[in-house]
Amino acid sequence: MSKIACNILIVDDEDDILMAGRLLLKQHFTSVQTTSDPYKIPSLLQEQPVDVVLLDMNYSTGATSSKEGLYWLKQIRQMSPNTSVILMTAYGDIELAVRALKEGAADFVLKPWQNEKLVAILKSASQKNNSKETRTAEAAEKNDTVYHYGEFIGVSPAMQRVYQTIDKVAGTDANVLILGENGTGKEVAARALHRKSKRANKAFEKVDLGAVSTTLFESELFGHAKGSFTDAKEDRAGRFEAATDGTLFLDEIGNLSLALQAKLLTVLQSHQIIRLGTNKPRPINIRLICATNMPLYEMVREGSFRQDLLYRINTVEIHLPPLRERREDIKLLAEHFLRIYSQKYERPNLRMNQNTLRRLNEYHWPGNIRELDHAMERAVILCDGDELQADDFYFAPSVAAQEQRQMVESLADNDYTLDTLEKMMVQKALVKHSGNITHAAKELGITRTALYRRIEKHGL
Ligand SMILES: Nc1ncnc2c1ncn2[C@@H]1O[C@H](COP(=O)(O)OP(=O)(O)OP(=O)(O)O)[C@@H](O)[C@H]1O
C-alpha cells in the first residue's frame, strides 16, 4: 500500500494515545510525529511544515473545559494557516464541536476513535490541505507570525508560556512582577502588557529605580510643591501622577534601599501619594509592573527586601528565561538582528554560514538578547566578505572556563600535592554553596559523610 505524502503531528498528554495513533497512521501516511507537550507545537511547526495536527482538547490533569484545545487551535491557525487541525476529545460535546469548526478546525473526532474513521478524516484533511509546493507567498509571509509576538521573537516553549501569561493578565489590573537576567526582554514584556491592556492609549511611565538617587526618590515618584527644596522652582507632578490611568513600570526594583521600599509600600497600600512639601493626599490610578534581575526571594530571606512589598507587587509573576535556556530562539533572533543591521549598514548580501550559527548556538550569552543584538551589529560592521564568520564575534569565556584556566595557570606556577588540591576543591565547593554540605558534596561527587571526613581532615 503506498503511503500518502502527509506530515501529521499528534498532540495529546496521554502516551497510550500517542503510541496508538502513531502505529495506526504510520501505515497510511509518510510522516507521523507526536508530542505530549502542547507548548512544543510552535517549535515543531517551525522546524518543518506540518500538514495536519491531530489535537487533544484538554491537557491539565482533570481538565474538561477544552479551553486549552481551543487556545492551541487558534495559535496553530495563526502560526501556520496551511495546517489543518483535527480536534479530538473524549467528551461528546456538539456545541464545542461547532465552536471549534467555526474557529477553523477542519474536523472533529471522538476518543476512543474508530480506526477507519480516523484514517478517512485524515485522508480528507490531507487532500484539502495545500501541498508544500503550492503554499503561497502570502501564506509563507503569514507563517512568519510563528515567531513574532509583538516585538518578541521566539518559538521556544519557555517563550510560549510567557506570551500566554501576558495574554491572560494584560486585560486585568493585577500587579505584575517580571523576573529575569539582564537583557532577557523584561522591558519588552512590560510594554507588551501595557499595549494589550485597557490602558493602552494612556501613558506608559518607566522609572529606572537603579538610577534614582535616594534624595530625589520622593520628588521623582510622588512630585513636589514649589519651594519644598532648593531646586524646586515650581510645582511638579511625580511619575505616579504622570502614569494616571496608565501603567507605571518600576524597573530594577531590587535596587531600592529598605527605607525607600517602606515609602513605596505606603503609597501602594494607601493608593494615594502626597507631593513633597504638601499635605494633600492625591488618589492614584495606575497599573503597576515591576522588574528586576535580582533574586528577590533570597533578598527577603536575607532581610534586604521587604516581604510585604514583594507580596504587594507579585500578584502575577513572569519569568523571562535566559537565552542559553532557549537555544532554539538564537537562530531566529540572530537572523532578525542580521536583517536589521544589514539594512542599516547597507550590506544587503550578508549571510551567516553554518559554522557561525553553530558557534552562536553554543555560546552561553551572559548578556542575553541585548548581547546578541550588539554582537550582530558589531559583526555586520567588521565583516569583510558577504559571509559573517565566527571570528567577527567576540565570545567571552564562561565563568567556569575562566575558573578552570586560572586553576590550570596556578597549578603550573605552584608545586601542589594531591592533598593540597583536595583541600582547595573542598574549600571552593563549600564557599560556592555557602557551607551547604548537601550541595557541596553533590558538586564534588561524594557523599555527605565523605565530605564531613575531608572537612575534618583538612581542619576546615
Ligand atoms: N524576544 C525578543 N525578541 C526580540 N528582541 C528582544 C526580545 N527580548 C528582548 N529583545 C531586545 O533585547 C534588548 C533588551 O531587552 P530589554 O531592555 O527588554 O531587556 P531587560 O531584561 O529589560 O534588560 P535589563 O535588565 O538590562 O534592563 C532590547 O533591545 C529588546 O528590544
Image: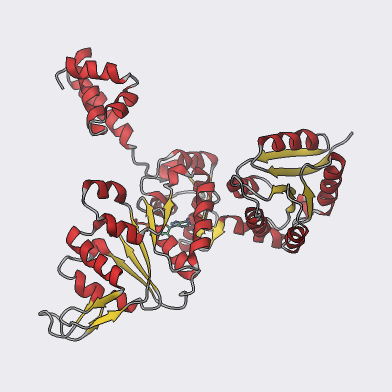
Determine whether, in the image, residue 227 is placed left or right of residue 326.
left
Q: In terms of depth relative to the viewer, which is nearer, 81 or 21?
A: 21
Residue at point 34%, 37% (across, down): 398
Figure colour scheme: secondary structure
User: Which residue is at the far right?
Assistant: 1
Report x, y in % for residue 460: 16, 22
Residue 310, given in percent of the width and then of the height, sits at 31, 57
Image location of residue 229, percent across then percent down: 11, 79
The residue positioned 35% from the left and 59% from the top of the image is: 291
Left or right side of 22 for 355: left
Q: Is residue 41 left or right of residue 252?
A: right
Depth order, front residue of 324/72? 72
Please tell me whether residue 399 is drawn above or below residue 49 in the rendered image: above
Residue 274 shows in this picture: yes
Which is more toward the observer, 334 or 157?
A: 157
Asked if residue 184 is positioned above or below residue 30 in the image, the reply reads: below
Q: Can you tell me which quadrant of the image ligand 1 is in?
A: bottom left
Residue closest to the far left? 230
From where the camera sits, is residue 416 visible?
A: no
Task: Name the image quarter holding the N terminus.
Answer: top right
> In the picture shown, does residue 8 fall above or below 374?
above
Residue at image coords 32%, 33%: 400
Locate residue 193, reporting x and y percent. 46, 65
Image-quadrant location for residue 44: top right
Across the whole image, how many numbered discs are drawn on residues? 0
Q: Is residue 246 above or below residue 126?
A: below
Foreground residue, 404 or 235?
Answer: 235
